[in-house]
Image (cartoon, grey):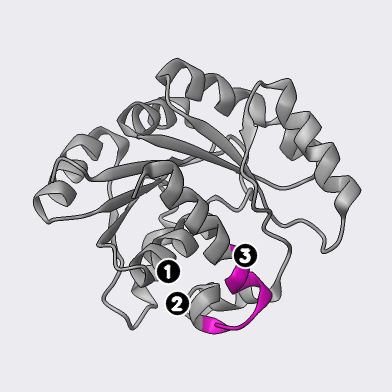
Amino acid sequence: MADMKIVAVEAGKGGSGKTTTTLNLAVAAGMAGKTVVVIDLDPQASAAGWKDSRPAETPVVVSVPSTRLPQALQAARDGGADLVLIDTAPHSEGAALAAAKAADLILIPTRPGILDLRAIGTTADVAKIAGRPVFIVLNAMPPGATRLVEDARAAAAVHGLDVAPVVIEQRAALSHSLTAGQTAQEYEPTGKAAAEIGRLYDWLATQLGS
């Protein structure tokens, strides 16, 4: 399928919410009728481990080394995937660049802490080398912390990057759901986390033109 869309989810710092963002968007896309594949490039294989504990057959999650990314993408295309989300490893610029170059769009999840925001720089440089559209996704934000959101947006602007308009706040459903092999929209369909993920996916779909 020539119109298969590829999104690389990258972060230079561990604990940024990268895998959580990837999996929640993957399930949201599936709920929207898309055939989704998650390619897990992280040696820790957290996304693949989540899939092992998941009763549902979808989304497909494939754990491969970054050197096998082209083959994994071709297999997804041959299998009729509409959307591929690539979950990359932190502290791995080579894998991050390979994923960024293959992607139509790059997401950089980050928490609001100053150390997290400072770590954006390396990933931002990789994204710029790849020449793809890139957006920062603010997540794990304390509920109602408007000032903190504005400070985080200002820090992102230093790198010349746009920030996704949907902020993911710190919600228990995000962590509890993954433990159960689910995502927020499945674990607590009417909850605030589910609503935020839904809005983030809708925005992403618009960016991808799908």
Compared to residue 115, the image places residue 147 above or below, namely: below
Labels 1 and 2 touching (C-beta < 8 A): yes
| Residue in the image at 49% along x and 25% along y | 127
Query: Based on the displayed image, in which of its 4 quarters is residue 207 positioned?
Result: top left
> For the magenta stretch, what is the residue range?
187-196
The amino acid on which the numbered mark 1 sits, given as a three-letter code, is Trp
* Circle count: 3
Answer with mark 1 or mark 3, whichever residue precedes in sequence: 1
Answer with mark 3 or mark 2, whichever residue precedes in sequence: 2
Residue 50 is labelled as 1
Query: Based on the displayed image, in which of its 4 quarters is residue 160 positioned?
Result: top right
The amino acid on which the numbered mark 3 sits, given as a three-letter code, is Glu
**Residue of label 3:** 196
The image position of residue 51, as x and y in percent, is: 36, 70
> Which residue is more in the foreground, 183 or 34?
34
How far is the residue under mark 1 from the one under mark 2?
5 Å
Compared to residue 48, the image places residue 134 above or below, namely: above
Compared to residue 25, the image places residue 30 above or below, namely: below
Q: Residues within 10 Å of mark 2 (few under 14, many from 20)?
A: some
How far is the residue under mark 1 from the one under mark 3?
21 Å
